[in-house]
Image: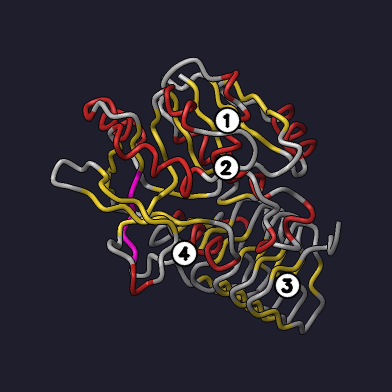
Amino acid sequence: MKAVLLVGGLGTRLRPLTYRIPKPLVPVMGKPLIMHAVDSLPDEVDEVIIPVGYKKEAMQDYLEKNRPKRKITLVDEPEPLGTGGAVKNVEEYIDGPFMVLNGDMISSLDLNGFLRFHREKGGIASISLWQVEDPSPFGVALLDEDNRITRFQEKPKREDAFSDWINAGAYALEYEVLDHIGEGFVSMEREVFPKLLDHGMYGLKFDGHWIDCGTRENLLGAFNILMGTTGSVSPEAVTEGAVINHPVVVEKGAVIAGATIGPDSYISERAVVGPLSDVQGSVIYCDARIGSKSKIRGSIIDEGVTIPDGAEIVSKIISHVTEE
């Protein structure tokens, strides 16, 4: 079985981090976003097809150095084609029922169970659904008692939304869906899903966690979810006088030199946090250096960055690459 991983977009909301690397390679808990998606797929998925344009060479380089257990095929997408157009662009690689997954989400969805649900319903398409307070930024689905989708509404005004269950970015699709996707730029949500309703389109609700990692706040939130209620600290990383307030993760090879690491922080391998500095709700990537008496709040410090003594960084992404 094939799966298509959608990783389009320039990651503009994560700049300047995504000036250095494409969003699919942004590490979350030591593993790129793309691999969180790949590793979540059912075992029967033997090939993952990824249409990609932005920084394709970086993706190729990563996959050559870190070969995954299943086949991954990168397909050129020289210009943005939308979610539907990206799938149509890789049609020649698809030979039967297939899955589509947004590559920038962290989710507790059991994809094996989702695939079983799709097969049991016997429709042309199934999508995952997540409940939110404000559905206006998303596609909204209305279900009947058999979980069949009767209406689909893309990014409605909050007051006009007929449901608070949104499209959570995982699809199980029959091959015939490709016949409903036109050439060029096509939105799966706006143009394709409405055509599928009469052919049997179903929605699976799930709970647990779901987060789109496209912003600084959400990316930090993904770390918080995955580190759990306590996290983990490499004992040799912590020097005398350091204060650790859980949940935090401090990887092996990091150095916490008499600093305070507050809740919801992730310190990568070989990162150094200097004396009397205070890091809370932040991610410090590998080889970064935080000087003494610095204050880091709600921020992401990219790999290799040096933060000078006494600096105060609040709600920012700091990278040594500031433009393309």
Q: Is residue 131 magenta?
A: yes
Tell me if label 2 and label 1 are in contact, CB under 8 Å.
Answer: yes
Which x, y percent locates residue 286?
71, 54
How far apart, in angstroms, are the residues tagged by discs 2 and 1? 9 Å
Placement of 106 over or under 56, stated as above or below: below
Name the element at disc 3: loop
Q: Magenta-highlighted stretch: main secondary structure?
A: strand
Which x, y percent locates residue 103?
55, 43
Q: Residue furthest top?
A: 95
Q: Is residue 324 magenta?
A: no
Residue pictured at 65% horizontal, 80% vertical: 314
The residue under label 4 is which amino acid type?
Pro
Magenta span:
128-132
Q: Earlier in the sequence, mark 4 or mark 3?
A: 4
The residue that disc 2 covers is 186
The residue under label 1 is which amino acid type?
Lys
- Where residue 270 sits, quadrant-wise, is bottom right
Quadrant placement of the C terminus: bottom right
Question: Which is closer to the viewer, label 4 or label 3?
Answer: 4
How far apart, in angstroms, are the residues tagged by discs 4 and 3? 41 Å
Which x, y percent locates residue 52?
69, 37
In screen coordinates, is 132 left or right of 274?
left
Q: Residues within 10 Å of mark 3 (few under 14, many from 20)?
A: many
The residue that disc 4 covers is 137
The residue that disc 3 covers is 274
Q: Earlier in the sequence, mark 4 or mark 1?
A: 1
Which x, y percent locates residue 283?
62, 63
The residue that disc 1 covers is 88
Q: Earlier in the sequence, mark 3 or mark 2?
A: 2
Question: Which is closer to the viewer, label 4 or label 2?
Answer: 2
- Where residue 322 sits, quadrant-wise, is bottom right
Name the element at disc 1: helix
